[in-house]
Amino acid sequence: MQKVYDKATSTYTAPYDKGVIKTITATKDSQGNIQEYALPLSEESDGTIRLMSKAAAIQDTLKVGGVLIVDEIENRLHPLLVQYIIEKFQNQSNGQRAQLIFTTHSTDIMNRGMLRRDQYYFVDKDNMTGESELYSLADFSVRLEENIAKAYLLGKYGAVPYIDEE
């Protein structure tokens, strides 16, 4: 059985075997020896399950090119894993032209400088008509040192929910 090691999660993944997907995790014991143990995927955390459900699509898109669309990329994933996935698409050297399109509610992504300003898009919903408008951060005059996440949460770019406190 061939195992695949994922540096981002420090996890080995076993191939599909007899209807049960298992992950094989490597740890060191008190003497420094590597010990491996298998867990059915159903016993892994929600984040690991979500990552595993997307891993093949991520790998395939990066390898052969194309577009991968992910709704709420940060959902149940550690911020460093999200950053790792985004950076894999941003730093392609294989020439396959893979593209990642994702939605998020995480302003953490805005703070990390992972994306260029022309890669941010907002969706603003009109509460009266229900219509949504899509527009780019590039449509605004944004200073280089501006904290995009803070300005967004303050409503500078729109696309923030209206909360009626009554």
Image (cartoon, rainbow, N blue to C red):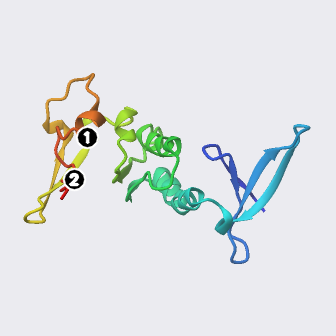
Between the C-alphas of marks 2 and 1, the distance is 10 Å
Residue 139 drawn above or below residue 134: above
68 or 114, which lies in front? Answer: 114
Determine which quarter of the picture holds residue 152: top left
Q: Residue furthest bottom?
A: 19
Give how far across and how far down residue 67 sits, in percent: 37, 56
For residue 2, what is the image quadrant?
bottom right
Residue 142 picture location, percent across and down: 19, 29
The residue labelled by disc 2 is: 161
Residue drawn at x 54%, y 60% is 56
The residue that label 1 is drawn on is 153
Residue located 72% across and 72% down the image = 17
Q: Is residue 107 left or right of residue 158?
A: right
Q: Callout 2: 10 Å neighbours few (<14), some, many (20+)?
A: few
* Vertical comparison of 26 with 116: above or below: below
Question: Where residue 114 sits: x, y (%)?
Answer: 39, 35
In the rendered image, the quadrant that contains the C terminus is: bottom left
Q: Is residue 8 left or right of residue 31?
A: left
| Amino acid found under the numbered disc labelled 1 | Leu
Q: Is residue 5 left or right of residue 87?
A: right
Q: Secondary structure at mark 2?
A: loop
